[in-house]
Amino acid sequence: MWIPKYRQRILNSGVREYLGKLFPKILEQMPGCEIITYNIQVDHIHMVMIIPPKYAVSDVVAQIKMRTSSELRKKFGWLHKRYWRENVVWSPGYLVSTVGVEKERILKYVEHQGRQDSGQAKLDL
């Protein structure tokens, strides 16, 4: 899981669609790496992947973030205005966890992650 810099809500439908096309192209350079599922919300990305032991997880995530950042900035000029002080899109950190016994539960969570918050009651002040 990773987020845009400053948790900006930049991952609109056009950006999400473009990222969906970029991910497979990036992984072509890393044979054996495979995306099982992903879910892109307006302010974060969840992804479940298979990463073979020959790759460091940090290197795979760094490649994905670096290449998508570069391509997004080329494709969407408005990102230059949003991040005018820095040549970035993503926050420097990310969350990684291994999937084991609870694989099906985690896959279901990632696939339905955006819908979980939509049913909560709103607080009226």
Image: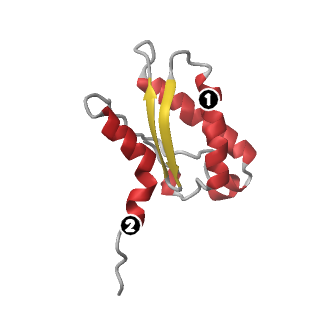
Where the C terminus falls, by quadrant? bottom left
> Is 118 displayed left or right of 97 in the figure?
right
The residue indicated by pointer 1 is 24
Question: Between 121 and 82, which is closer to the camera in this rendering?
Answer: 121
The residue indicated by pointer 2 is 119
Examine the rendering and report whether any part of residue 83 can be seen.
no
Picture disc at residue 68: none
Q: Earlier in the sequence, mark 1 or mark 2?
A: 1
Question: Between 52 and 38, which is closer to the camera in this rendering?
Answer: 38
Disc 1 crowd, CA 10 A, few/some/many (<14, 14-19, 20+): few
Question: Between 25 and 74, which is closer to the camera in this rendering?
Answer: 25
Where disc 1 sits, the SS reads helix
Name of the residue lying farthest toward the bottom: 125
The kind of residue tagged 2 is Gly
Examine the rendering and report whether any part of residue 99 can be seen.
yes
Q: Is residue 58 above or below residue 75?
A: above
Residue 112's spot in the image, x, y percent? 43, 50
Residue 89's spot in the image, x, y percent? 58, 46
* Residue pictured at 69% horizontal, 45% vertical: 73
Q: Quadrant of residue 123?
A: bottom left
Q: Nearer the viewer, mark 1 or mark 2?
A: 2
Where disc 2 sits, the SS reads helix
Type of colouring = secondary structure
Name of the residue lying farthest toward the left: 101
What's the distance in space between the residues labelled 1 and 2, CA to CA? 32 Å
Disc 2 crowd, CA 10 A, few/some/many (<14, 14-19, 20+): few
The kind of residue tagged 1 is Pro
> Is 59 displayed left or right of 75 in the figure?
left
Where the N terminus falls, by quadrant? top left
Question: Between 33 and 90, which is closer to the camera in this rendering?
Answer: 33
Residue 22's spot in the image, x, y percent? 65, 35
